[in-house]
Amino acid sequence: MENSLAPAFVRIESASAYAPHVMTIPSVPLIAAVGDAPPYFDLRGAEIDVNVDTAINDFVDLLRPLFKSTYHWSSYTVFEQAGVGDEPVPVWSAALTQVGTSAETREDKAWQQTFTFRATDFTLYKLVLLDSPPAYGSERQVNISTNVNYEALRAYIVANETWIASRGGGRPNTFLQLSSTLNEKLRRSYRMN
């Protein structure tokens, strides 16, 4: 169902030099692991299922070059949700230790970058990055292939073996745009003029 986090989702906790942030990402269903081990993402079609810890660390590693060295990731929690309106149940959590690596000189404070994709079920998937310096400035981009780090993130999200899902459950498969703007809520929170 559109705009649902069911059947599973991931919350990634991080912090910039200015504030803590939480990123919520809808995912494919989970497969429980045997014993005290992370579950697996049940990937679509004939794709080989992937360990959630490996997948999330790989994803965060792709985010690192988009953030300055004052940004760090601290942990993630994976949830299952039986259906819309059902209570999410945490099933796995682990620490993260990654730190941003961007050498971008543009300002990062209160900037929001939003990657928008169309999914196979024609719903949208949006990835929002907060306090990330916009390498393309404030101009809307429909082609990000000129930046190797942005392109690597785009390719990961639209890959056949992605664990990421739209809120409709579809696989993000068409990049639509990258928009960058100052986030007014963050500006007020940071007491910026």
Image (cartoon, rainbow, N blue to C red):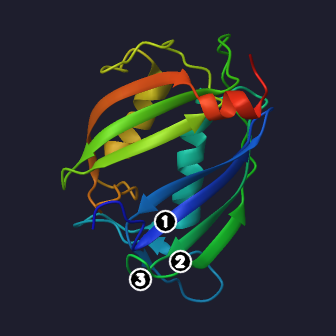
Task: Please tell me which residue is depicted at 59% across the width and 59% down the height of the picture.
Answer: 11
Task: Please tell me which residue is depicted at 28% across the width and 54% down the height of the picture.
Answer: 171
Give the structural element (helix, strand or loop) at label 2.
Answer: loop
- The image position of residue 64, as x and y in percent, is 63, 35
Task: Please tell me which residue is depicted at 59% across the width and 29% down the height of the picture.
Answer: 183
Task: Please tell me which residue is depicted at 19% across the width and 52% down the height of the picture.
Answer: 120
Residue 65, can we see it? no
- The image position of residue 139, as x and y in percent, is 42, 12
Task: Inspect the image, locate mark 2, and give the three-letter code of the amino acid beneath it.
Answer: Pro
- The image position of residue 66, as x and y in percent, is 59, 28
Quarter of the rendering occupied by the N terminus: bottom left
Total tally of numbered discs in the picture: 3
Task: Inspect the image, locate mark 1, and give the three-letter code of the amino acid beneath it.
Answer: Phe
**In the rendering, which numbered label is found on residue 82?**
3
- The image position of residue 118, as x and y in percent, is 25, 43
Mark 3 touches mark 1? (CB < 8 Å): no
In the picture of the structure, the residue carrying the numbered disc 2 is: 88
> Mark 3: few, some, or many residues within 10 Å (few <14, many ≥20)?
some
In the picture of the structure, the residue carrying the numbered disc 1 is: 9
The mark that comes first in sequence, 3 or 1, is: 1
Report whether 34 appears left or right of 103: left
Residue 1, can we see it? yes
Give the structural element (helix, strand or loop) at label 3.
Answer: loop
Give the structural element (helix, strand or loop) at label 1.
Answer: strand
**Cα–Cα gap, marks 2 and 1:** 9 Å
Mark 2 touches mark 1? (CB < 8 Å): yes
Mark 2 touches mark 3? (CB < 8 Å): no
The mark that comes first in sequence, 2 or 1, is: 1
